[in-house]
Image (cartoon, rainbow, N blue to C red):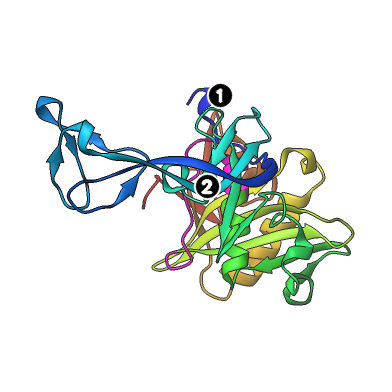
Amino acid sequence: MALGELVQLLGRKEMRMGPVTFRRCPGCGIEGESFIGGPGGLVHCHLCRGEFPPSEFKVVTRSRSIAVCNGCGRQVSLTPANEGWLGYLCAHCNNYVAVHYGNHRLQPSIPLKVTWNSDAGARARAVGRTLRFLECRTKKDFLVVKLLQVLAQQEHAPFRSVSSADHKAALFFRSDQVAYIGFLVWTEEKAVVLRQIFVKPQHRRRGYASDVLRFWERRRVEPLRSSFGVESPNDRTLRLLVKLGYARMDGEHVIGVRCFFLPSGL
């Protein structure tokens, strides 16, 4: 993945109402910013599946919310044409100018603050003196994980999207800081499998990953199993597992001791 394709969380400079151009299908009347070209120069409507000459699509202007991208300064309409997985993306620089939470269109930086999730401090468990471990239970919790995954994907593209129906997850943060430090994702089906672990770059080399992984293993693995799986660990995760004694080096290879390794998707 090229650097220009990486999704960013830079947000917007401002948001206002402004004109957006749509084209109305002559068959069903649906208005869209774009339609699919078909054979013979006809335009295909995805709703009524009709095909019509481009000249039959009436041009209409509607007032819609428009954000000014904080990445490149371009105007981005908050309309379906610019809608991505988590919100609205600038097509030029792949920056989220807004993220969805219910009917709200939030600055991406807002959910990444612990204070946005008002009961996070009360629900989190202490890991040492200042670190806190928050098991994800709510839509707010999982939105934060998904946003942190965007940051993780900037370093390691294979980070796959998390689902509250299929995964368990946790966030961690310091009680004396505003923002989250990182997250874990795991499953507990036939085996307990660590799927993802991520610490934001500015918080590395402080022992947070070690503390959190030990806490997670004691709290989530030991009551169920004597060992846990690790899905497609990268070099950083392998070093962490060896450091904590969950794995060992055998020449150039890493061998599981209290963990075992699984390929992606299993």
Of residues 147 and 132, the one drawn nearer to the viewer in this rendering = 147
Q: Secondary structure at mark 2?
A: loop
Q: Nearer the viewer, residue 70 or 210?
A: 70
Which is in the foreground here, disc 1 or disc 2? 2
Residue 3, label in figure: 1
Question: Is residue 127 toward the left or the right of residue 252 in the image?
Answer: right
Name the residue: 48% across, 66% down: 164
Question: Main SS of the magenta segment?
Answer: loop
Please rate how many residues cluster around mark 1, counting C-alpha atoms within 10 Å: few if below 14, some from 14 to 19, many from 20.
few
Crowd around label 2: few <14 · some 14–19 · many ≥20 (10 Å): many
The picture places residue 231, in percent across and down from the top left corner, at 47, 49
Q: Is residue 126 visible?
A: yes
Disc 1 or 2, which lies upstream in sequence?
Answer: 1
- Give the residue type that dot 1 points to: Leu
Q: Position of residue 234 (x, y in %)?
A: 55, 37
Which quadrant holds residue 166? bottom left
Q: Please name the residue that numbered disc 2 is placed on.
A: 78
Looking at the rendered structure, the kind of residue marked 2 is Leu
Comparing 220 with 56, the one in front is: 56
- Which residue extends farthest left? 40
Q: CA distance from mark 1 to mark 2?
A: 24 Å
The reply to whether residue 248 is visible in this rendering is no
Q: Residue at x 42, y 48 (%)?
A: 80
Which residue sits at x=51%, y=69%?
A: 225
Magenta range is: 148-166
Residue 152 is a magenta residue: yes
Q: How many marks?
A: 2
Using the image, determine if residue 6 lies above or below residue 263: above
Residue at 56% across / 53% down in the picture?
A: 146
